[in-house]
C-alpha cells in the first residue's frame, strides 16, 4: 500500500494527514512516477490555510514539483521510457509516493543531476527564469531587487541574475540571514530595519532597479514599484503577508487585500513602468515551461547554477517541514524525501 499526504481541511499543521492510497493508473498521454524527492513551496502552506484560490476543494494532496523514476508509460508516450529519471511539475498531488503527470509536464534528467537538485528547480528556478528572461528581457548590466532573498526563489533569482550579467542584486530578508544572503552574491537589506527603496536608488546611481520581484504583496507592492527605474518591471508572484502565522489569519489576509495597490494605467504610462502578475501553476503553455526546464537543466549540468538545499524531511515529518518554513528558518529549498 502506498502513502500520500493530504490536507483534510483548512487549518494549522494538525489538518495534515498521511494516508494509505492505491497506485494511480496513467492515461494514454501520462506517465507514472515513483517519487524520490518533492519540493515544498510557500504556496503549499497557503493552500492548507485556505488562502490559495487555485487550490482544489478539501481534502486534497498538495505539491507542485517532484523528481523520481518512471514506473509506467501510457500508450501514447514517445519521448519518455520506463526507468527514466525525471523531474516533473505537478498540478497538485506531488506529496505522494507515486504521482501521474502528462508527458509535457516531465523532463528526463541528465545523469549528473541529483533528485534533490532536480526537485528544487521546477517552481523556484522556472519562476525566476520566467520573470527575468522570458518576461523581463533581461540585459547585461540590469539591476534586480528580490524579496525573501534567502528562500528558494530568492536564491534562484540571485544565481540566474548574476549568470545573466546583473550589475546589482539587492535582496531583503531578516537580519539573521544577512551573511547567507551576501554569500549568494546579493546586497542585503534588513526587512526589519532597512529601507530597500533607498538602497536600490543608492546602488543604481539614483535611477532605481530594472527588475523588482515581490512575493510579499499588500502595501509592500507599491514600495517595490517605487524602487524601479524608468522602464523598470515589477513582478508580483506571491502574497506571503497574508500568511504571517501557522494558522489562518483572516485579519492578515484582509489587511493584505485592502493594502494591495490598484494601479492606474495612465500613471503607469507616464512613469514608463510595467507590472506583471505571475502564477506559474496557471501558465497554460507547457511548451514554454518545457523550454525553461531544458535550459535550466543544461545550466545545472554545466555547474552554472546550483540549487541551495536548506533541509530534507522524511515525508511523514511534513508538519515539521512546513513549520520550519512558517518560522522563516529556511535558507534555500526545503524538500520531502519519498525514497523507497
Image: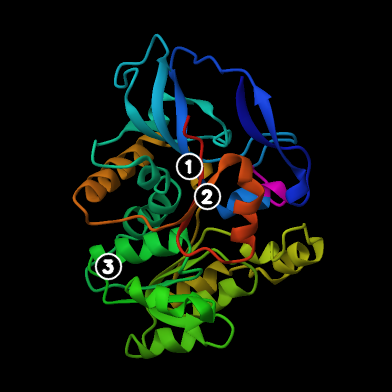
In whole angstroms, how far apart are the C-alphas of marks 1 and 2? Answer: 7 Å
Against 116, is 304 above or below?
below
Name, please, the residue furthest toward the top: 75
Q: Residues within 10 Å of mark 1 (few under 14, many from 20)?
A: few
| Mark sitting earlier along the chain (2/3) | 3
The residue lying toward the viewer, choosing from 159 and 3, is 3
Q: What is the magenta range?
A: 47-54
Q: Dot 1: what SS?
A: loop
Give 223 or 265, whichever is nearer the viewer: 223
Residue 46 is situated, as x and y percent measured from the top left of the image, at 66, 52
Q: For marks 2 and 3, give the CA distance.
A: 23 Å
Provide residue 283's location: percent of width, then percent of height: 48, 42
Q: Quadrant of residue 265?
A: bottom right
Q: Nearer the viewer, residue 188 or 5?
A: 5
Q: Which residue is mark 1?
A: 283
Q: Is residue 30 left or right of residue 164?
A: right
Residue 231 in view of the camera: no
In the rendered image, residue 150, in percent from the top left (x then y), is placed at: 46, 68
Predominant SS of the magenta segment = loop
The numbered dot on residue 162 is: 3
Q: Residue visible at 66% across and 49% down?
A: 319
Q: Secondary structure at mark 2?
A: loop
**Compared with residue 112, is residue 138 higher up or lower down, i.e. above or below?**
below
Q: Which residue is mark 2?
A: 279
Q: Position of residue 261 (x, y in %)?
A: 63, 70
Q: Quadrant of the N terminus?
A: top right
How far apart are the alpha carbons under marks 1 and 3?
26 Å
- Do residues under tags 1 and 2 come within 8 Å of each other at their CB atoms? yes
| SS of the residue under disc 3 | helix
Amino acid at each position: 500500500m502506498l502513502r500520500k499526504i493530504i490536507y483534510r481541511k483548512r487549518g494549522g499543521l494538525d489538518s495534515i494527514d498521511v494516508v494509505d492510497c492505491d497506485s494511480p493508473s496513467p492515461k494514454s498521454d501520462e506517465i507514472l512516477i515513483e517519487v524520490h524527492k518533492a519540493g515544498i513551496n510557500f504556496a503549499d502552506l497557503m493552500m492548507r490555510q485556505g488562502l490559495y484560490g487555485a487550490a482544489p476543494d478539501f481534502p486534497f494532496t498538495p505539491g507542485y514539483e517532484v523528481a523520481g523514476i518512471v514506473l509506467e508509460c501510457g500508450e501514447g508516450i514517445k519521448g519518455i521510457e520506463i526507468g527514466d529519471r525525471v523531474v516533473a511539475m505537478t498540478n497538485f498531488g506531488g506529496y505522494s509516493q507515486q504521482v501521474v503527470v502528462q508527458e509535457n509536464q516531465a523532463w528526463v534528467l541528465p545523469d549528473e543531476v541529483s533528485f534533490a537538485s532536480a526537485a528544487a528547480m521546477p517552481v523556484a528556478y522556472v519562476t525566476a527564469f520566467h520573470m527575468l528572461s522570458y518576461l523581463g528581457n533581461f540585459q547585461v548590466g540590469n539591476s534586480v531587487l528580490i524579496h525573501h532573498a534567502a528562500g528558494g526563489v530568492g536564491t534562484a533569482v540571485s544565481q540566474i541574475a548574476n549568470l545573466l550579467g546583473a550589475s546589482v542584486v539587492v535582496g531583503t530578508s531578516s537580519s539573521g540571514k544577512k551573511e547567507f544572503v551576501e554569500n549568494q552574491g546579493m546586497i542585503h537589506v534588513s526587512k526589519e530595519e532597512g529601507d530597500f527603496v533607498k538602497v536600490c536608488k543608492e546602488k543604481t546611481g539614483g535611477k532605481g532597479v530594472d527588475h523588482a520581484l515581490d512575493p510579499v504583496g499588500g502595501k509592500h507592492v507599491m514600495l517595490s514599484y517605487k524602487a524601479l527605474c524608468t522602464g523598470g518591471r515589477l513582478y508580483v508572484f506571491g502574497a506571503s503577508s497574508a500568511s504571517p502565522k501557522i494558522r489562518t489569519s483572516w485579519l492578515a489576509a484582509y489587511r493584505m487585500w485592502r493594502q494591495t495597490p490598484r494601479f492606474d494605467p495612465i500613471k503607469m504610462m507616464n512613469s514608463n513602468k510595467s507590472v506583471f502578475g505571475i502564477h506559474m501553476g496557471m501558465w497554460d503553455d507547457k511548451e514554454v515551461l518545457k523550454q525553461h526546464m531544458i535550459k535550466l537543466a543544461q545550466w545545472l549540468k554545466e555547474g552554472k547554477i546550483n540549487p541551495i538545499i536548506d533541509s530534507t524531511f522524511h515525508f511523514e515529518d511534513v508538519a515539521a517541514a512546513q513549520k520550519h518554513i512558517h518560522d522563516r528558518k529556511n535558507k534555500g529549498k526545503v524538500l520531502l524525501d519519498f525514497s523507497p
